[in-house]
Image (cartoon, rainbow, N blue to C red):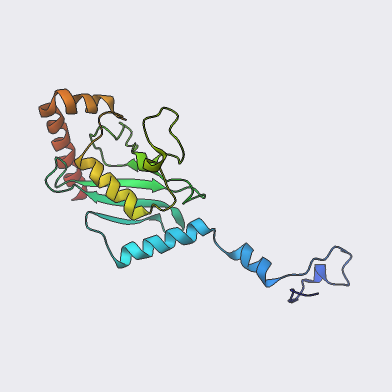
Amino acid sequence: MRGYRFRNVPSHLSKSSKSDCFQPYSYLTELLLMSEPQSALLLRKQLAELNKNPVEGFSAGLIDDNDIYRWEVLIIGPPDTLYEGGFFKAHLQFPKEYPLRPPKMKFITEIWHPNIDRNGDVCISILHEPGDDKWGYEKASERWLPVHTVETILISVISMLADPNDESPANVDAAKEWRESYTEFKRKVARCVRKSQEECL
């Protein structure tokens, strides 16, 4: 039988067995059963690359060493912004279909920002499902693309901290303060920065 190599066959599947539906092993079948999904392999590769070549502004690791799909990141508030000096923790939850579909990102540290809702969920074009926006606010090229990586996601989020998009807010109150009551907005952000520093001590 071409393409197959027999291994030690369990007794209950041997010729002397009452079973007459024995299907031979193939090394290919075994490897497929044992191998990780491509998404997991890709995420392990990206994690190894970030550990080998850290990117300024954030650090990343796994919440649980046994679950490659759940990451924890620490974003350092970018300089010359209201968030400077802050240490903001967030979680990334990757789908099994990654990189065809985007992860979801949620800040664990309290943060006040027009594009982060009160629960910490991040609303940014790069993390929106691929394809056309049914509301017409975003171009398909602005949404998720399979070429994106953990690094490009976090760089985009850091850029978002520096330059909020108040036209499509996840936190309407924060967006309104950003436009109409900037002093109050700064006060709330400063409180979040101080709180994040205390939590990191």
Vertical placement of 125 versus 147: above or below? above
Q: Is residue 66 left or right of residue 86?
A: right
Vertical placement of 119 versus 126: above or below? above
* Residue in the picture at 30% in, 50% down: 154
Vertical placement of 160 versus 152: above or below? above
User: Quarter of the image holding residue 180?
Assistant: top left
Residue 191 point in image, percent of width and height: 15, 36
Vertical placement of 71 versus 16: above or below? above
Residue 147 point in image, percent of width and height: 41, 53
* Residue in the picture at 35% in, 46% down: 91
Residue placed most toward the observer, 10 or 30: 30
Residue placed most toward the observer, 115 or 199: 115
For the N terminus, which image quadrant? Answer: bottom right
Q: Is residue 154 left or right of residue 190?
A: right
User: Quarter of the image holding residue 196?
Assistant: top left
Residue 20 point in image, percent of width and height: 88, 64
Q: How many marks?
A: 0
* Residue in the picture at 39% in, 43% down: 141
* Residue in the picture at 43% in, 58% down: 43
Residue 118 point in image, percent of width and height: 30, 31
